[in-house]
Amino acid sequence: MGSIDGEDAFAVWAPADAPWSAWAKPIAFIQPGGTISTESLDEKAVPTIEIALATHTAVIIDLPGADAVYMGLALASRGFRPVPLFNGTSGPSPIVEVAPITRALGSGVERLAGMRLAPDAPPAFLLDSRRDGTSVKLTPGSYDNRWIVLPQDFPSAALLASRGITAAILVRTNGVSIPADLAHVLRRWHDHGIRVDVVDTATGHVAANVTVPTPSRFKLAWYAAVALFGLRRSNVGGFGSMIPHQAGRRGFYG
């Protein structure tokens, strides 16, 4: 089993000559000791893509953990540039497991480097659908690394259009509903004429040319502050901090 410096691995996933690298997040590549494993990629984990894709399309892959990475590698084989947007740090007893994502990113380095994607390849943004920790109980002593995406985590509709992007595909599993945080992104794109389709990988169902619902607090100046309330920032730039234990009757401290 080999390893690679996290910074070098990030450079493969977010090369300097790729315009979409400006949005890539390095958090999942930051590990104790500075290196991440490059264990052999399980080829069975990389899915076969049955989605009709065009070069004028941006893809958002919103799948659980490492599945998003494997789907990103599959799309890379179709000429798309996978852009990791994972923004939760790793820690003891985490609310959201980051280690499998990091392992998948490391194992995909050699494969991705060998593809020699064009600098102007269309983007496939990678997200962890478990990022908000909805299904996990928050308990004192756990590492709270929940996170969400904000509109500024993605290129604007105007920038996408300037690079010939006229459509977007959201890839999810077990349904074609649009998460609230992504609705703030996709509604902006939709309002500027970008077509939005949603694909359910579990069933193959495609919701074509959807009208993205207007989310709560849409375009309000204080939306980000309210949306991030209660999420714990990490000192390395992502999200992550211990949930403190109770101190008497005054609730939590920290």
Image: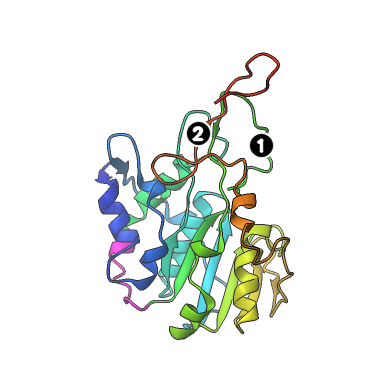
Q: Is residue 41 visible?
A: no
Of residues 218 and 82, the one nearer the viewer is: 218
Q: Is residue 38 magenta?
A: no
Q: Is residue 242 visible?
A: yes
Q: Quick one: label 2, few (<14), some, or many (20+) residues within 10 Å?
A: many
Q: Is residue 118 magenta?
A: yes
Of residues 219 and 243, the one nearer the viewer is: 219
Q: Earlier in the sequence, mark 2 or mark 1?
A: 1
**Measured from the top left, where is residue 148 in percent x and y?**
58, 52
Of residues 139 and 77, the one nearer the viewer is: 139
State the residue at coordinates (47%, 52%): 86
* Magenta-highlighted residues: 111-120
Q: Which secondary structure class fits the magenta region best?
A: loop
Of residues 55 and 155, the one nearer the viewer is: 155
Task: Determine the image quadrant of residue 36.
Answer: top left
* Quadrant holding the C terminus: top right
Q: Which residue is mark 2?
A: 241
Look at the picture and state if 159 lies above or below 7. Answer: below
Q: Which residue is mark 1?
A: 136
Three-letter amino acid code at disc 2?
Ser
**Measured from the top left, where is residue 154 in percent x and y?**
50, 66
State the residue at coordinates (36%, 55%): 108
Q: Report, in whole angstroms, how far the alpha carbon at label 2 lies from the one at label 1.
A: 16 Å
Say what secondary structure mark 1 lies in: loop
Q: Quick one: label 1, few (<14), some, or many (20+) residues within 10 Å?
A: few
**Measured from the top left, where is residue 124 in percent x and y?**
47, 68
Disc assigned to residue 223? none
Q: Is residue 236 left or right of residue 252?
A: left
